[in-house]
Image (cartoon, rainbow, N blue to C red):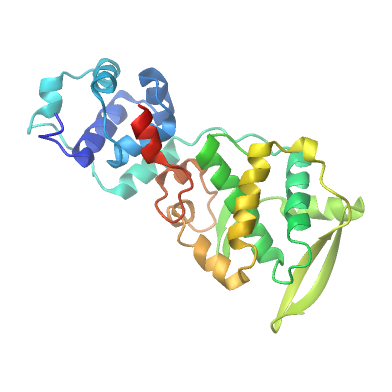
Amino acid sequence: MQDKLTKKDIGFRVTELRKRKGLSQEDLAKQVQISRSSLTQIELGNRGVDVLEMYKLSVHLGFSLDEFLSPDFDQQADSGIQEQLLEGKRERIAMPSIPIEKFKNTLLYVLERCAGKPNVGETVLYKLLYFSDFNYYELYEEHLTGATYRKLPFGPVPQKIDHIIQQMIEQGQLQRVKTVYRGFAQTRYLPLVKPNLKELKASETDTIDGVIEQMSDWSAAAISQYSHKDMPWLASKDGEEINYELAFYREAPFSVRNYGEEMEDQ
């Protein structure tokens, strides 16, 4: 089969047949008994399909192997990555309402770990939260804080954070400090209480720690520029909510999941 078709060919044909059936990636992945991220990698042409998976795909997408392999396969849709990304947006999963206590303790954990770092003003803080949330979603296919982020000029920003921070200040959990860093006005937040680690799983703190280790010493300009190259931000329109599903379209150096190992395990 793969002597005749490339992974890209197979991925496009699976995508086209899935769309015709009106199935989301999540629906088809469940039917074929693979993870949604594995199906994303198949459709992008980054992952092969074994014989059993091809059989299950043929059953649920309603094609015969002969027609799938045929050079006359009907390719009416645009095979470009942007079309696949737009499809991913249409399949947006229902976002949970943000668990406020979880978000507060995540924020306190990040600030505690970055205590004393003068570069961690609002811009850096917001990007550390963004990469923690999206890295966790790519790794585990579930939300860390459940916060929604929007594509704004200086990078992704968590929504409702001003209200949450103000509430934490009034409750004596945070202190807001206006200062100047390297000639620029800066707003910083100092934690006045410790995070409740019972609110965070080990996998969550590990993910946050990885982001802090990688990025917490970066300047606001550097981390903003880096976020602008991340696929979820790139594939979103200005002011639009950034879809967590776009994390599965990341490539190096942004992707934090080893899809190669998943292919070997199939």
Where 181 falls versus 169 (above or below)?
Answer: below
Please give the name of the residue rendered at 66% of the width and 58% of the height, measured from the top-left corner. 126
Specify whether residue 147 is in view: no
x and y percentages locating residue 165 in the rendered image = 80, 54
Q: In the rendering, at what x and y percent does residue 217 appear? A: 64, 67
Closer-to-camera residue (67/198): 198
In the rendered image, the quadrant that contains the N terminus is top left
- The vertical placement of 197 against 22, above or below, is below
Q: Is residue 74 visible?
A: yes
Question: Which quadrant is the C terminus positioned in?
Answer: top left
**Quadrant position of residue 74:** top left
Given residues 20 and 110, the one toward you in this image is 110
Residue 79 sits in which quadrant?
top left
Seen in the picture, residue 97 relative to 121 is either above or below; the reply is above
- At horizontal 81% and vertical 73% (from top left) the residue drawn is 178
For image coordinates 65% across by 41% down, the residue present is: 204
